Amino acid sequence: MKKDLADTPSLETVANLMTRVGLLDAEIRGGKRDAEYFANIETVALGLFRIVVVGEIKKGKSSFINALCGTRDLVPVHDNVATSTIFKIHYGVHSEYKVYFQPEAGRKKRTISADQLKQYGTEDGNPNNGEKVDFIAVQSPSQLLKEGFILIDTPGVGGLFKNHRKITFKYAPKADAVFFVTDSVESPIGADEVSFLKELRNITKLIYFVQTKGADADPESRKRRMENNISILTDQAGFSKEEIRYFVVDSNLKLAADETKNMEDLQDSGFIPLMAYLNNDLKPARVYNIANVGFRRCYNKFIEIRACVQQQRSILDAETVEKQQAILEELNSAESSINDWNSNIRPQLVREFQVQVQAIQNDINTVVSDKFRQGGELSEAAGRTLAGYATKGPEIIYKSAQPLAEEVRAKASEVLLQISNDLETRMTALLEALARKIDGSINLSNEFVGRSRMETKQIHYGETQLRELVKKGEDQRHFEKVRTFVYGGMAGVTIASIAGGIVGSVVPVVGTMIGSTIGMLIAGAWGGKEATSIVRSKEAAAARQSVHAFIEKDLSSIHVQVQDGFNKAFTSLRFQADEALAAKIKNFMSQLAADRNLLMQRGKASADEIAKEKQRIVILESQIASLDRELKAMDKRLY
Ligand SMILES: Nc1nc2c(ncn2[C@@H]2O[C@H](COP(=O)(O)OP(=O)(O)O)[C@@H](O)[C@H]2O)c(=O)[nH]1
Ligand SMILES: [Mg+2]
């Protein structure tokens, strides 16, 4: 059972402990640092929290972000000029804006001044995104950002329903929180927003509500608005009253309060409970997950170090030739068991594993085909919608092409997320089964294995943890980092921990990989061409047919992308477990060689040299004992 989240150690504390373990590891390996492990410490220390802000145009999204950051005009706020691009806002010592262009624009990113924001980031200065801006990265020294929050401001040009989905589908699945912004003065949550929210819920459960412009309404009407909105959310959008987190704020008041340091205004702005919720509830949950994975990684390394030092200790303590001989025999027999297992059993287990991965792949291919192929479920559903237009004229049917295509893409994204969950569950089960088989198939002498076997805990990577990793898989570099972060987590010193190692290292990798594959596929599904090229005909039946043909074509391009994406992912999945095994075995063998070497040297060493060696071990042992206490204390806080 998980403990109170508020008791989670800070990521700094976890990173510090990881560093100490990493340095001790380097010390016993003759000063050589495990580069991967140290890179992973950075990942922990950097643990970030992503907030995506969505909502209709002019509801106050950009103002809300500025208020959160405590910086006026950090992102442009306008009375009559609409934001036309994504802003990604993150921490940096200096304020800075950088424009990133879409790949097809073939332009390098460029730093711009705040004055140029209008030119690239608004509908006025950059109509229909003629500049092909992908997003604008905003760097700011704000305190909130410094604490590891990343904010994403989204446009909402001309009605949220049509234009927002693409963006939301791209960013929301990876968000740690999605803030849906509505306001206190104009209309309550409308039909378009309801259908948008329903879709949003299919891809993330982390939706929170903000009602802005609180100070523009009197307290009574702003409360009525809130109650009204909440009943819309429960009656029409499928939210339950208990799950809704709803905040009434005023962003302008918050900004003013920051400037004048007026406590009363700050209180009235409504930002205190919102920030408290962010800091006390949302962020700790995320920190917990990162801390947990980092801690496991650290603990694995610690077990290696301890086993290694224990082995050195027993070699030094072996005073007699008989005792030394016994150790040598133990090492030799371990080596031959491993070799034996490696050449006879491992290939067989790996083959079985690969056959089962293939079976999963076949199932996934079937599902993908059932859903996406011509005449498949998605196409049929679109056909049914079109059949509903039987009494409509051709013009109306043509007009329905674009929304219908978007409908299909939204559904495709949903299906992809479902497949990804299913795939993750099945791959995890398969890896756990493999781990059990490995564990059951290795016969090593008990004394040799016993010590570390006791310490090998079953590592549970819950769904949320996997999601954490998945979210981070966004850009390729980060993905690689996370991959090594979890993947490298298993290089152990005894074969007994292989089984746990496989589950502990490969399972999160699987989650990360599936997540990033799905992320790309969803983005790809939304990258389809616009429904503009339909040949127009006068007759309604022909119009229905040509719209359906268009949808089919759209689907078939998505189908190709999806199949291709999954095939690539499977190719890699198939080899993950074996790669993890190979690394483990290599490590084990080099440890055996080192032990044997020490044993030989001990045979030749003078009493003086042995005494000195023992002194070195005593120091290491005391470091290990103190790390052991701290790790146990941290373990208690995490479980
Ligand atoms: N009084 C008040 N005005 C606000 C608030 N939030 C936004 N506004 C105003 O509403 C307009 C639109 O805000 P903006 O943040 O650009 O909305 P966006 O299109 O959703 O990003 C601007 O004129 C803001 O000054 C608020 O909390 N209080
Ligand atoms: Mg805006």
Image (cartoon, rainbow, N blue to C red):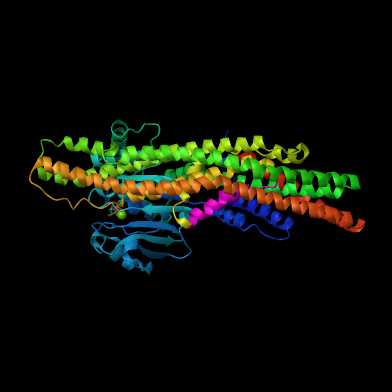
Q: Residue furthest left?
A: 538
Q: Which residues are magenta?
A: 477-494
Tell me if residue 486 is in the magenta stretch: yes
Query: Considering depth in this image, is 448 or 121 the residue closer to the camera?
Result: 448
Q: Residue at x 56, y 45 (%)?
A: 577
Q: Which secondary structure dominates the residues rendered in magenta?
A: helix
| Total labels drawn | 0
Query: Considering depth in this image, is 228 or 320 the residue closer to the camera?
Result: 320
Question: How far from the left and from the top, in percent, is residue 127?
Answer: 23, 61
Image check: 565 left or right of 580? left
Query: Considering depth in this image, is 395 or 209 the residue closer to the camera?
Result: 395
Image check: 422 left or right of 554? right
Quarter of the picture holding the N terminus:
top right
Q: Is residue 389 visible?
A: yes
Q: Residue at x 37, y 31 (%)?
A: 241
Q: Residue at x 39, y 61 (%)?
A: 137
Q: Quadrant of residue 453?
A: top right
Quarter of the picture holding the C terminus:
top right
Image check: 316 left or right of 351? right
Q: Residue furthest front?
A: 344
Question: How far from the left and from the top, in percent, is residue 549?
Answer: 20, 45
**Ligand 2 rendered quadrant:** bottom left
Q: Quadrant of residue 218?
A: top left
Query: Considering depth in this image, is 203 or 379 the residue closer to the camera?
Result: 379
Question: How far from the left and from the top, in percent, is residue 590?
Answer: 71, 53
Q: Is residue 279 visible?
A: no
Tell me if residue 320 is in the magenta stretch: no
Question: How far from the left and from the top, in percent, is residue 418?
Answer: 39, 38
